Image (cartoon, rainbow, N blue to C red):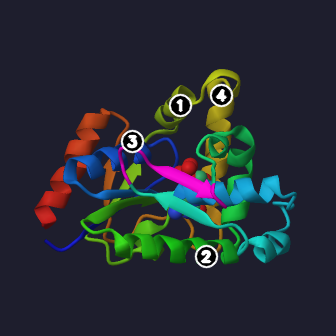
Amino acid sequence: ATPVIVAIDGPSGTGKSSTSKAVAIRLGLGFLDTGAQYRAMTWWMLSNGIDVDDPAAVAAASAKPTIVSGTDPQAPTITVDGTDVSVPIRGREVTAAVSAVSAVPEVRARITELQRSIAAEAPAGIVVEGRDIGTTVLPNADLKVFLTASPEARAARRSGELRGKEAADLASTREALIKRDAADAGRKTSPMAKAADAVEVDTTELTLDEVVACVVGLVEERR
Ligand code: C5P
């Protein structure tokens, strides 16, 4: 069979990662979390004292880190220069800085190239989740899904994911999430957007299993 490429985009807290991983497992495909790549780039900038609010400094440094993503949906991995960064990239500092770093065109060009080569090399195909996968990274994907959910549902899901000291109250999580989405949707280069040929799925009232069944069904319709 020819490889199947599935693009899953949408704002944070819509269940993109959980859905994408589960769909990949069900269909025997690879899985790529592109947000983790932007987070890894941001972690490297912060670790190396680059001012993330200085786009020229970020652009100049953007070719330096080597970011490697493992695409096994059962155990996705991400390293920067050989260091496993899967834990620190979920921290508050990286989350607060990632939209500024990901808005820099040089960063996007480099990471987009990486994403395309990973997708092209996936033997059975891949589920790629992000913000601009259907519009920019993989415009020829076999299926494009755009996940949405109410701000309340998204904030509740995000708070549930944050643990211990990082666990902020619902109101400030909601605030931070709305701010990040506005930055991601409003940037000049490859903003978060629903592709014209994407299927929109509102997950507010759906369980994870229901969303997964819906996306698997959409893939099967297209095979
Ligand atoms: O999905 P996640 O919340 O981990 O993404 C982190 C950030 O990475 C987003 O807020 C956005 O700034 C950036 N991103 C992006 N393009 C993508 C995926 C993520 O700009 N395809």
Q: Secondary structure at mark 1?
A: helix
Residue 65 on image: x %, y %: 70, 67
Q: Is residue 72 left or right of residue 61?
A: left
Q: In which quadrant of the rendered image does the N terminus lie?
A: bottom left
- Tell me which amino acid carries mark 3: Ser
Quarter occupied by residue 218: bottom left
Q: Which residue is mark 3?
A: 18
Work out whether mark 2 precedes mark 4 in sequence or the reverse, and give the earlier one. 2
Ligand 1 resides in the quarter of the picture at bottom right
In the image as oriented, which residue stretches furthest toward the front? 82
- Prevailing SS of the magenta stretch: loop
Range of magenta residues: 72-82
The stretch drawn in magenta includes residue 77: yes
Residue 147 on image: x %, y %: 38, 51
- Tell me which amino acid carries mark 2: Arg
Q: Which residue is mark 1?
A: 161
Q: Which residue is mark 4?
A: 171
User: Mark 2 vs ligand 1: CB under 8 Å?
Assistant: no
Using the image, determine if residue 206 lies above or below residue 108: above
